Image (tube, rainbow, N blue to C red):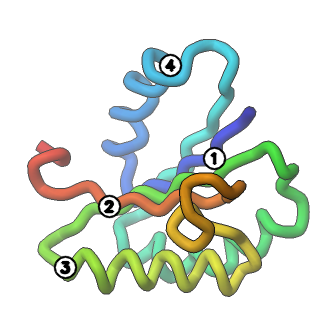
Amino acid sequence: MHIEFLVEELSMKEALRNLLPKILGETITFDIHPYQGKNNLLSKLPYRLRGYKSWLPDEHRIVILVDEDREDCKLLKEKLETIAIDAGFSTKASVGIKQKFQVLNRIAIEELEA
């Protein structure tokens, strides 16, 4: 399995680069793609996901990780879900636990950021 991580900033990339090998082990590969802030990521996300949809193998996954930044979490999650579904992906929230999905949207709240 391979996971593509889309994150909003370089500091999140560096944190994940150190944490993920310990969590995922050696059998799961990953790439981390940082953006220049949440607005930059959100504005480019529809295009990036449509690009992925044209070639991404079924066994690959995409994790989109953004900071909460005092936004309404439900609205932010709905926005991420809509972007992924509009690009043709199934998300964990849209299909449930037992069905296959390719996109996992996650929001880091302030306590986790620290």
Q: In percent of the image, x 51 and y 82: which residue is there?
A: 43
* SS category of the residue bearing label 3: loop
Q: Which of the labelled discs sits on residue 107, or is there none?
A: 2
SS assignment at label 4? helix
Image coordinates for residue 69, horizontal then vertical, percent: 18, 69
In the rendered view, would you say 21 is above or below 42? above
- The structure residue drawn at horizontal position 10% and vertical position 48%, both measured from the top left corner, is 111
| Viewer-nearest of discs 1 and 2 | 2
Question: Which mark identifies residue 4?
Answer: 1
Binning the other alpha carbons within 10 Å of mark 2 as few (below 14), some (14 to 19) or many (20 upward) gives some
Question: Tag 2: residue type?
Answer: Ile
For label 1, count other residues whose C-alpha is less than 10 Å away and answer few (under 14), some (14-19) or many (20+): some
Towards the viewer: 100 or 9: 100
Location of residue 25 in the rendering, given as x and y in whole percent from the top left corner: 56, 15
The residue lying at 44 percent from left, 16 percent from top is 22
Indicate the secondary structure of the residue bearing disc 2.
strand
Q: Which residue is mark 4?
A: 21
In the rendered view, tell whether residue 8 sits above or below residue 5. below
Name the N-terminal-most of marks 2 and 4. Answer: 4
According to the picture, the residue beneath numbered tag 3 turns out to be 71
Q: Is residue 20 left or right of residue 56?
A: left
Picture disc at residue 49: none
The residue shown at (63%, 47%) is 4
**Distance in Å between CA atoms under marks 1 and 2:** 16 Å
Q: Disc count in the image?
A: 4
Q: Are marks 2 and 4 in contact (CB under 8 Å)?
A: no
- The image quarter containing residue 68 is bottom left
Image quadrant in which you'd find residue 50: bottom right
Distance from Cα at disc 2 to Cα at disc 3: 10 Å
Marks 2 and 4 sit apart, C-alpha to C-alpha, by 21 Å
Circle 3 residues within 10 Å: few <14, some 14–19, many ≥20:
few
